[in-house]
Image: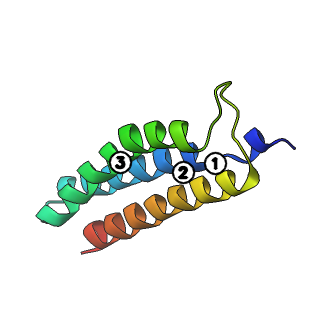
Amino acid sequence: MTLDDAVFWIDWVVTAVSALFLFLLGAAQEGKPIGTSYVFAAIIALVLGGMVMPFTFRILCYDGSGAIKSWIHVVVSNAVGLLILFACVAAGVKTYGA
């Protein structure tokens, strides 16, 4: 297993944003009210996960050849990705379950 095989933050962020938007879509189709804070959370997750994180991680966690620098960089980037995933799922469940 190489360092690049352990990088999962990209998958988790894409899953998080997709899940949140599906929860919001499901709530809207059932006529449930969607709070402004949840729409804001969806926009923040999309911007953070789609633009800010890749750019920041490219600068901080990857070297000039595109390989991740060390195991600590893998752990930190995956932890940030998991936080985004947990926040999006919690917001989506709260919206859809309301």
**Mark 3, secondary structure of its residue:** helix
> How far is mark 1 from mark 2, CA to CA?
6 Å
Extreme residue toward the top, this view: 65
Instruction: Return the x and y of residue 25 as percentages of the image width and height.
Output: 26, 50
Q: Relative to 65, is 36 above or below?
A: below
Rendered-image quadrant of the C terminus: bottom left
**Mark 2, secondary structure of its residue:** helix
Residue 15 is left or right of residue 20, and the answer is right
Rendered-image quadrant of the N terminus: top right
Image label count: 3
Residue located at (71% from left, 42% from top): 69
Comparing labels 1 and 3, the label whose residue is closer to the camera: 3
User: Residue 48, labelled with which disc?
Assistant: 3
> In which quarter of the view is residue 95 placed?
bottom left
Comparing labels 3 and 2, the label whose residue is closer to the camera: 3
Residue 87 is left or right of residue 98, and the answer is right
Q: Relative to 85, is 46 above or below?
A: above
> How far is mark 1 from mark 3, CA to CA?
16 Å
Which residue position holds label 2? 12
Q: Amino acid at mark 1?
A: Phe
Q: Amino acid at mark 3?
A: Leu
Which residue position holds label 1? 8
Residue 39 visible in the shown view: yes
Instruction: Return the x and y of residue 93 as percentages of the image width and height.
Output: 35, 69
Decide: few, some or many residues near mark 2? Use Cα within 10 Å; few <14, some 14-19, many ≥20: many
Residues marked 1 and 2 touching at CB (< 8 Å): yes
**Mark 1, secondary structure of its residue:** loop
Q: Which residue occupies the foreground of this view, 54 or 21?
A: 54
Residues marked 3 and 2 touching at CB (< 8 Å): no
> In which quarter of the view is residue 38 placed?
bottom left
- Earlier along the polypeptide chain: callout 1 or callout 3? 1
